[in-house]
Each structure stands twice: as C-alpha cells, then as structure tokens.
Amino acid sequence: MKTVRNTKYPLSRRAFLKSGLAAAVAVPMLNLGSFKVFAASESRYSAKVIELVQSTQVFDMLSLMAPLGQTIKAATSKQPKLEDGYGLDEKYLRLILSSGTDVFHPAVGVGADEALAFVARLNALAAEHPQHLQRIDSISDLDNLKKGQRVGFIVGTQNSDHFRSLDDINQFYTLGQRISQLTYNSRNLIGTGSTDRNDGGLSSFGVDVVQRMNTLGMAVDVSHCGDQTTLDAFEVSTKPVLITHSNVRELAGGHIRCKSAEAIKALAKSGGVMGITGIRQFVSHREPTNLISMIDHIDYIARQVGVEYVGVGSDMDMDGYDDIPAPFLNMLKAQYKSSYAFRDKLDTDGFDHPKRIYDLTDALLRRGYGEADIRLILGGNFKRVLGEIWQA
C-alpha cells in the first residue's frame, strides 16, 4: 500500500484520506493537469481518466452492492432471518452511484435453501430504490442507466445448487436470474468446484443444465469450477461461457482458484470474457501486490488470446475486504480451505476503495493501452458477450 509521508503524521493512503488531515497535507497528484472527481475526495485523476470512465458504461462482473461486513453479521446473527444482510442505506448507495461503475453483478455463494430468498432480496432493491437501481434483464435495459444517477445490477448466484431439476432453471429465469455459476468451491450435482481433491467434470445432469441455460439465455459462469468442469462447460455450451471473476494461474503462483492457460484459450474459443479480480492471493503470490500486478493479468490475456476477452470482476464490495471488522473477516476466512492461501491482507494495493475503477483506468493508460481497448476492458467486452448469451 502506498504511504503518504509526513514528518508528523505517517499514515497509509487509505487512513490519510479517511482522516481529517487531508485538508492540511497535500496528496500527490497521479497526473499533471489532474482534477478531483468529487468535491469531497482528495484523490485526483487526469482529465483523460475521468473522460474515459464517465463516457464508458463500466461493468464489474462480481461486485457486492451491500457491505460484506453487514452481510456476514446478518448471516451469523442469533436471529439471521431478522437481520437484513443486503439492504442499502443512503450513504452506501451514494458510494455505489459515485463509484464510476454502471453495472454490478452482486452474486454470492448461496445454497439451495437460500437461493430463492437471495434472488427475492435483490429484486426488492430495485423496488426500494427505483430512481437509482435498475435490474438488468436484457441488453436494452442498459439504456435506462445514467452515469452517477442510476446503476444496474444483474441477478446471479455463485452456485447452482438450487437447480435440482431443469425446470428450476426456468423458474429462476422468470424471477430475473440471468447468470449462474455452475459450482462454488465444492462438488454439487452439476460438477466439481475448484478446491475439491479431484474433478470428474460435468455430470450428465450438468450437461443438461448447461444446455437448458443456453436455451433460456442464462449465462454460464465457471469462475469457481474445477479445471475439468471448466473445460467441459466450454465444450458443451453452444453459447459463450463466462469467467466473471478469476485470474491467470501462471501469474499467481499456481493458485487453484485461478484459471489455467488451457482454460483461457477455451474461453476465447467460446467467445466468453474473463473478469480480473483484485483478491490479493489471486493477483500475486509475492509482494508487492498492487495495480501493476493486476494489469499483468490483463496483459497476459490480451497477448495470449486478445483484448476482447478480458474485463473486470473485482470480487469485493465498495471498500474491499481489509476494512471488514476483524471478527467478521476471520469468520469469512474460516469458510475456505487452506489452499486459498490467505495472507494478512486480502485486497490489492490501489484497488481497495470505491473509486478503484479510476485507478485501474489510469494504470491501463500508463501501461500503454489505447482508448478503444480500455473501453472494451471496462465494459464493452461484457456488454457484447451478454448480448450474445441473452438472445434465447
């Protein structure tokens, strides 16, 4: 994490910006001729960065819309059904609207018994905030969004345990679900997750599930799937398959939750798109782990298969994981196997705050990406592929 040095107040950049010292000590500009994006913020970005973000419909294909600490607290409450883990207060809604992101995919790893309640709660968000939130059911719904005033969200889940029959897929499609990850980290009736000890690939039922999703126009997501299940999905599907949030295994020390070179080639062959995440151990297995490290993953995919197959899937809420109170963060870590290889920090330096999409855009410009390619990475690629998938 970059540190703003001052002889009297040595603070991390995050702590500095959140403190009252920002008015007294100058924050270094990222570019000459830079501007504040919002009056209340001391972060500065170049006119080109601001123009690119403001004029692009930005997609974050795994982006939690409620504070994750709130969600964990509700899930672990003595009366969990009385706690609202997914509600948005006005302060947090303002963070979402000012983030620069236009389309969110706030999927979580729910079990079969919780999926219906989760989808219903997401639908209720649009009813509670009709002026600011729009459920996205089709590409035409994107026309209703307005930067900074109205954002969209795609209903999805990070598990397909709730598909116990093929007709269940139709039911959830009717309720608004447009993306479903086939498995989380463990095996289910459909296939195998990334942290299981072996992977038998898609089951016969899993093949039928993918085919029914293709027919309806529901996107298949293999972000947490095991290697063989991932490859099977690309082989079976007649529509592009998504990796909404994962990274390149080769660049992350072989991390099991990241994707192999073979899977990335299969992704491109299917016409799918892979969203790069900011989870620290998925970005790099060594320090420093920062935005430069994230851009390396984008570079890898662009060089190996083409820039039209990569996007953003941050896999976090507005503030990232390291701001979650320690008891709840420890509860979260305890749900995963040791192969997840958590370190002290979970967030990538520079990609751990609500305006992170501006920093990512700045880093892409510094790496030499042109405007057209940056627009593809920020949202054009996912918009294209969802338009292809959702044509049932």
Image: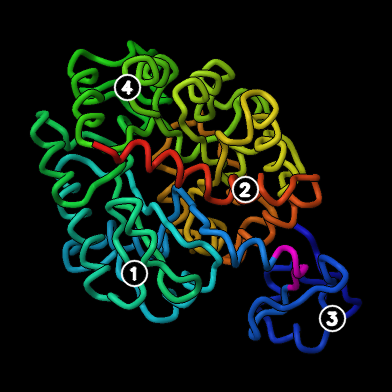
Q: CA distance from mark 3 to mark 4?
A: 54 Å
Q: Residues within 10 Å of mark 1 (few under 14, many from 20)?
A: many
Left-right relation of 350 to 378? right
Q: Which mark is residue 238?
A: 4
Q: Where is the N terminus found, in terms of image quarters?
A: bottom right
Q: CA distance from mark 2 to mark 3?
A: 29 Å
Which one is in front in this view, the residue at disc 4 or the one at disc 2? 4
Q: Amino acid at mark 1?
A: Leu
Left-right relation of 136 to 337? left
Q: Position of residue 302 (x, y in %)?
A: 66, 32
Which one is in front in this view, the residue at disc 1 or the one at disc 3? 1
User: Residue at point 61% right, 44% down?
Assistant: 280
Q: Which mark is residue 133?
A: 1
Contact, mark 3 vs mark 4 (Cβ under 8 Å): no
Left-right relation of 124 to 284? left
Q: Amino acid at mark 3?
A: Ala
Residue corresponding to mark 3: 26
Q: Nearer the viewer, residue 138 or 76?
A: 138
Residue corresponding to mark 2: 344
Query: On the image, which quarter does residue 208 sit in?
Result: top left
Q: Element at badge 1?
A: strand
* Residue 251 lies in the magenta-colored region: no
Query: On the image, which quarter does residue 262 sit in?
Result: top right
Of all residues, the one furthest to the right in this rendering is: 7
Q: Residues within 10 Å of mark 3 (few under 14, many from 20)?
A: few
User: Residue at point 91% right, 77% down?
Assistant: 7
* Magenta region, residue range: 44-49
Q: Position of residue 251 (x, y in %)?
A: 68, 28
Q: CA distance from mark 1 to mark 4?
A: 32 Å
